[in-house]
Image (cartoon, rainbow, N blue to C red):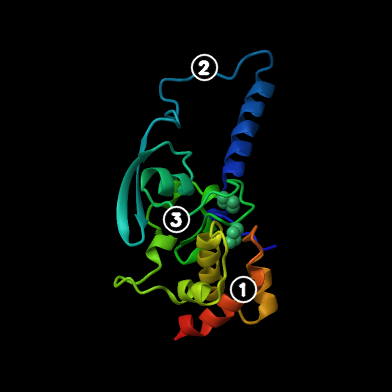
Amino acid sequence: MNTTNPPGGFSRRNFITTTAASTMTLTLLNPGHAPAETAPDATPDARSPHPVTLRVNGQDHRLSIDVRTSLLDALREHMGLTGSKKGCDHGQCGACTVLVDGKRTLSCLTFAAMLEGKDVTTIEGLAGPDGKLHAMQQAFIDHDAFQCGYCTPGQIMSAVGCVLEGHANNDADIREYMSGNLCRCAAYPNIVDAVRDAKPRMET
Ligand code: FES
Ligand code: FES
C-alpha cells in the first residue's frame, strides 16, 4: 500500500510521541515531582492563535491558528475549502489528499504551520482559470469513476500526483500507487481506466 508521508516526514503522531517522550524524560530526571513549572520565557502555549500564511491554489491566506491545526482542518474550517474530505483523520483512507509543491500529501497528517512558503493545490484549484476541467477530472467523469463521490477529490488529487511521479505506466502500477486511496463504493476498475486515459493528456 502506498502511503504518502507529510513533508519532512513529520506527522501529528511524531509530534505527540516526541512530546510524550520529553515529558517522560523530565519525570525520570525528577522523580516524585511534577514536570518543571512553567518558566516565564517558556515556549508559548500551542493553543494560542499563531499567524500563518498559506499559499493555496495560487492565493495567499493569512490565518491565525493553533499550531497543531492540521492542513485539512485549516482548509476546511478556516478557508472554506471543503473539497478535501475527512474520511478517517488518521492517514488511512486518502480522502484528504492534496498536492504540496506538486507532491501528494495527506492533509490530515500535516501541520498547516509547517507549510509556509509551500504551494498547496486542492481539488478546488485543479480546473483551469476558465473553468475547464483538468484532464484527470474529465477522465473520472468520462469513465464513471465514482459512485457516492466522497473519496473522489482525494482520488483525483492522488491520481494527478501518481502521474506526475511517473507511477502510472501500466494498470498494475496504477493499482499499486493508488492503493492508499480507499473507495467504499469499490469504483476501483473505473478509477484505473480514468488514470490510464488521463495520463497521456496530462503529458501533452
Ligand atoms: S482523512 Fe486523511 S487519510 Fe483519511
Ligand atoms: S465513490 Fe463512494 S467512496 Fe469512492
Q: Quadrant of the rendered structure where residue 57 is?
A: bottom left
Residue at image point 67% right, 79% down: 171
Residue for badge 3: 83
- What is the secondary structure assignment of the residue under circle 3? loop
Q: Amino acid at mark 1?
A: Asn
**53 relative position to 13: left or right:** left
Q: How many marks?
A: 3
Residue 58 versus residue 77 in the image, above or below: below
Residue at horizontal 48%, vertical 39%?
68
Which quarter of the figure is the N terminus placed in? Answer: bottom right
Q: Are marks 3 and 2 in contact (CB under 8 Å)?
A: no
User: Disc 3 residue type?
Assistant: Gly
| Residue 167 locus on image (x, y percent) | 61, 75
- Which of these two is toward me, 97 or 102? 97
Mark positioned earlier in the residue sequence (2 or 1): 2
User: From mark 2 to mark 1, how far is it between C-alphas?
Assistant: 58 Å
- Comparing 76 with 121, the one in front is 76
Q: How far is the residue under mark 3 from the one under mark 2?
A: 43 Å
- Mark 2 vs mark 1, foreground winner is 1
> x and y percent of residue 111 in the render?
49, 46
* Mark 2 burial class by Cα count in 10 Å: few <14, some 14-19, many 20+: few
Quadrant position of ligand 2: bottom right
Q: Which residue is mark 2?
A: 37
Mark 1 residue element: helix
Q: Earlier in the sequence, mark 3 or mark 1?
A: 3
Instruction: Estimate the spatial distance between the alpha carbons at disc 3 and disc 1, rounded to whole Å.
Output: 21 Å
Q: What is the x, y in percent for residue 93?
A: 62, 54
Q: Vertical placement of 192 versus 108: above or below? A: below
